[in-house]
Image (spheres, rainbow, N blue to C red):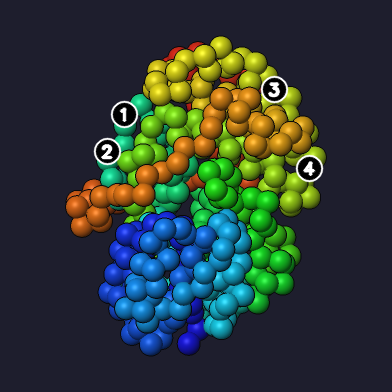
Amino acid sequence: MELTVCICTHNRPDYVRECLAGLARQTIPPEQFAILIVDSGSTGETPAKLARLAAAANATLRRLDQPGVSRARNAGAQSCHTPYIAYIDDDAIPAPDWIERIVAALAVSPPPAILGGRALPIWEAPLPAWWPHSLRGILSIIEVEGQGAYGDPALPPGLAPYTVNMVANVAHLRAVGGFADTVGRFGNALLSDEDVQLAWRLRDAGLPVRFDSRIVVHHQIQAARLTPAWLLSRLYWQGVSTVLTRRLLKRSEEVWRELPRRLAVALLCAPFALLPRTSPRLIGPRWRFAYALGFVRSAFGWRAAAIGRIADLPPVVDPPTHASASDNADRIAPDRSSPDSVPADTVSAGESCQAGTTATSPT
């Protein structure tokens, strides 16, 4: 047995059930891979529900008393007894040939330390017309096709791996200390980039980090996330995460080089932040302000807990219920962006924050 599938979850047993159902439909026999569920501090009746789901799926269940996605993923790697671990989000459903494709992609020389794939959306509600097309990736949607090493000219610039659909060599993951627990979702904080940071650390160590679009999961996009308030909160925390990730990768000079541009964007777009957080009006300059504010405050080292209050951008908590995948099967569509997850169309200091401005890549 070469592979363990790891599902990290917090208070979402319904999603876990659908993910396990997808694993039960794999073209690879079930005895050829293991399943590990990491319960990241779930409460109420959820632990008992997860225990029943794990027993029915012949999966191992590990419970952590405290939540935190990086902590959960590291616990999964420590509990893994196979050379590779395949991380999949609890709200993702693997394609029937998901594991078969992973096994084939690992059978190269040298084998990759990190292997990422596509995450195609299942919409629990239609994507609003006001949602910027360039920010689809902020929902952990990866629609790129192709194969190769991240950073190769054959793949789009800015493509990065995400643990919604990511395989890691367990020995290499452990050797670099796993996922940093200073990034990654914790409680209501929408911090991110723990997966990107791990991948680039391994790449910087000279190990192959590859993408293969034939490895596919279908990611259920929760309706509660398709709101202006969630998008602004998510972009704010992305700004925070970008700074943290660059510093963890010992690239602090990139933070200071970019800081004047983010300060300029924050000043230019600040008036638009006076609009209600629930309104989709002028969302372009408002998300740019949110991202820039998170970046600037994180660059100066101010505490994230205070940031959320000062910025009036509190994290948005997703509801515990969702529509089933079967109800949304007809909505399956056919990228957080740069190597450090800066949104691909984040404005530069010279760009306008006026309504209708077309976003461009940072320079």
Residue at image mark 2: 126
Q: Amino acid at mark 1?
A: Ala
Please state the horizontal and vertical placement of residue 308, each as a whole percent of the image: 60, 31
Pair 2/4: label in front: 2
Residue at image mark 3: 263
Under circle 3, the secondary element is: helix
Report whether residue 165 is seen.
Answer: no
Q: Residues within 10 Å of mark 2 (few under 14, many from 20)?
A: few
Q: Earlier in the sequence, mark 2 or mark 3?
A: 2
Circles 2 and 3, Cβ within 8 Å, touching? The answer is: no
> Could you tell whether 58 is left or right of 238 in the image?
left
> Marks 3/4: CA distance?
17 Å
> Could you tell whether 337 is left or right of 200 in the image?
left
> Marks 2/4: CA distance?
39 Å
Q: Residues within 10 Å of mark 1 (few under 14, many from 20)?
A: few
Circles 3 and 4, Cβ within 8 Å, touching? The answer is: no
Under circle 1, the secondary element is: loop
The residue shown at (28%, 45%) is: 124
The residue shown at (45%, 18%) is: 276
Under circle 2, the secondary element is: loop
Question: Foreground: 275 or 113?
Answer: 275
> Marks 1/3: CA distance?
29 Å
Q: Amino acid at mark 3?
A: Leu
Q: Amino acid at mark 4?
A: Ser
Q: Earlier in the sequence, mark 3 or mark 4?
A: 4
Circles 4 and 1, Cβ within 8 Å, touching? The answer is: no
Report whether residue 253 is seen.
Answer: yes
